[in-house]
Image (cartoon, rainbow, N blue to C red):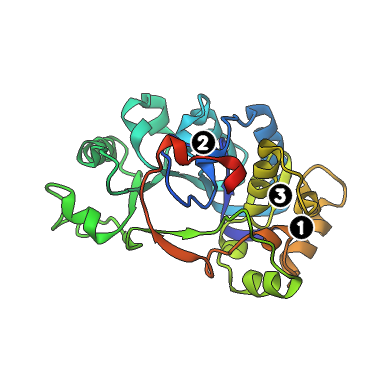
C-alpha cells in the first residue's frame, strides 16, 4: 500500500543567490553543495515504493542553481512517482533557462521580495511568454501586497490572470538562534503547533525527513565546526533499507517532536521580522 500525498519536497541545492534575513532554510549561511543526480534518482526510486504524489516540489535554497535541474524535473514523472512537478524560486535564474527547462516544467511558485532590485516585470513576462507555448505551465506568485503594487502593469489584473497572491506581509519567521536550547516540553509544544511537520516532508541525500530542519540544523553545526548538542541522524530515515516503509509509517504517526525542535524556534511560534537582504558582514554561521 502506498501513501497518497499532494507533494513532497526535493532539494537539488540548499544554498541560494539571495541573502534573506531569517531564511527558514538558513541558505545564506550554507556552503554551495549540489545533490548528486544519481543519488536523487535512487531516492525517488525508493520513495516510489511508499508514496504516490500529485506534485514533486523542488525547492532549496534556490533549486535553479543546480546545473542539472532539468534532469531533476523529469525523473519523478518518468517513473510515475508524481503527476507533475513544481519549483519554488526567486525567479532570478528563470531568464537564462533553456527551452528544455520550460518544456519539462509544470508549475512555478514565484517568491517576490521587496528591496532586491530584481526586475520582476521582466521575469513574469518571460513566464507568461512560455505559458503561451506550454499552456500547462502554472504560475503562483508568493509575495505581499506592497510588492504587488510595485509590479508595473500587474497591480490590477494579477489575480484576474489566475495567479494566486499569498499575502505574507513582507516578514520572515525567526527560526534560528544560536542560544536556542528548548526543554523537552518546549520542543513538544513547538512541534505540535508547527506547520512544517505536515507540509515540508522531504527527501534529501538518501534519507526521508518529516521536517527539513533536521538536515538544516545538522548542516549548520557541521559547517560551523560547533559540536551539535543532539544527534539529528535519529530523525533521518534511510530510504534504502528493508524496513524503510515501517520507519516512515512510525514517523508519520508519531506525536513526538524531532531532535531539531530542541534548537528551533518553530515556524508557527517564531517571531515575525521584516524581510530584507543581509550585508556580507552579517553572515556569520557561528552566530546563527
Q: Bin the neighbour count of mark 1 within 10 Å (Cα to Cα): few under 14, some 14-19, many 20 and up.
A: some
Name the foreground residue: 241 vs 100. 241
Marking on residue 248: 1
Q: Position of residue 61 (x, y in %)?
A: 51, 41
| Quadrant in which residue 221 is drawn | top right
Label 1 SS = helix
Residue shown at 52% from the left, 66% from the top: 270
Marking on residue 208: 3
Name the foreground residue: 250 vs 129. 250
Q: Nearer the viewer, mark 3 or mark 2?
A: 3
How far separated are the C-alphas under marks 1 and 3?
Answer: 8 Å
Sequence-wise, the earlier of marks 2 and 1 is: 2
Sequence-wise, the earlier of marks 1 and 3 is: 3
Compared to residue 177, the image places residue 187 above or below, namely below
Q: Position of residue 236 (x, y in %)?
A: 76, 50
How far separated are the C-alphas under marks 2 and 1?
Answer: 24 Å
Q: Position of residue 136 (x, y in %)?
A: 35, 44
> Looking at the rendering, in which quadrant would you find the N terminus?
bottom right
Disc 1 and disc 3 in contact, CB within 8 angstroms:
yes
Compared to residue 268, the image places residue 58 above or below, namely above
Residue shown at 31% from the left, 59% from the top: 164
Label 2 SS = helix
| Residue 268 visible within the image | yes
Marking on residue 73: 2
How far separated are the C-alphas under marks 3 and 2?
Answer: 19 Å
Amino acid at each position: 500500500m502506498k501513501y497518497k500525498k499532494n507533494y513532497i519536497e526535493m532539494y537539488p541545492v540548499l544554498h541560494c543567490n539571495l541573502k534573506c534575513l531569517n531564511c527558514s532554510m538558513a541558505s545564506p549561511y550554507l556552503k554551495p553543495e549540489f545533490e548528486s543526480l544519481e543519488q536523487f534518482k535512487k531516492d525517488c526510486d525508493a520513495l516510489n515504493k511508499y508514496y504516490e504524489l500529485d506534485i514533486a516540489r523542488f525547492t532549496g535554497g534556490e533549486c535553479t542553481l543546480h546545473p542539472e535541474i532539468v534532469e531533476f524535473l523529469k525523473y519523478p514523472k518518468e517513473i510515475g512517482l508524481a503527476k507533475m512537478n513544481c519549483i519554488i524560486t526567486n525567479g532570478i535564474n528563470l531568464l537564462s533557462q533553456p527551452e528544455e527547462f520550460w518544456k519539462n516544467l509544470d508549475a512555478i511558485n514565484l517568491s517576490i521580495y521587496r528591496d532586491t532590485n530584481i526586475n520582476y516585470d521582466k521575469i513574469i513576462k518571460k513566464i507568461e511568454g512560455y505559458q503561451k507555448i506550454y499552456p500547462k505551465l502554472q504560475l503562483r506568485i508568493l509575495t505581499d501586497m506592497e510588492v504587488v503594487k510595485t509590479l508595473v502593469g500587474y497591480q490590477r489584473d494579477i489575480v484576474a490572470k489566475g495567479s494566486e497572491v499569498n499575502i505574507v506581509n513582507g516578514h520572515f519567521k525567526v527560526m534560528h538562534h544560536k542560544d536556542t536550547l528548548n526543554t523537552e516540553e518546549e520542543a513538544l509544544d513547538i512541534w505540535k503547533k508547527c506547520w512544517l511537520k505536515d507540509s515540508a516532508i522531504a527527501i534529501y541525500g538518501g534519507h526521508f525527513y518529516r521536517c527539513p530542519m533536521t538536515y538544516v540544523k545538522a548542516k549548520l553545526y557541521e559547517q560551523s565546526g560547533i559540536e551539535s548538542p543532539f544527534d539529528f541522524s535519529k530523525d533521518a530515515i534511510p530510504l534504502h533499507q528493508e524496513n524503510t516503509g515501517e520507519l516512515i509509517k512510525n514517523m508519520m504517526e508519531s506525536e513526538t517532536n524531532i531532535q531539531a525542535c530542541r534548537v528551533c524556534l518553530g515556524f508557527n511560534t517564531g517571531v515575525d521580522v521584516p524581510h530584507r537582504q543581509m550585508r556580507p558582514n552579517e553572515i556569520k554561521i557561528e552566530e546563527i
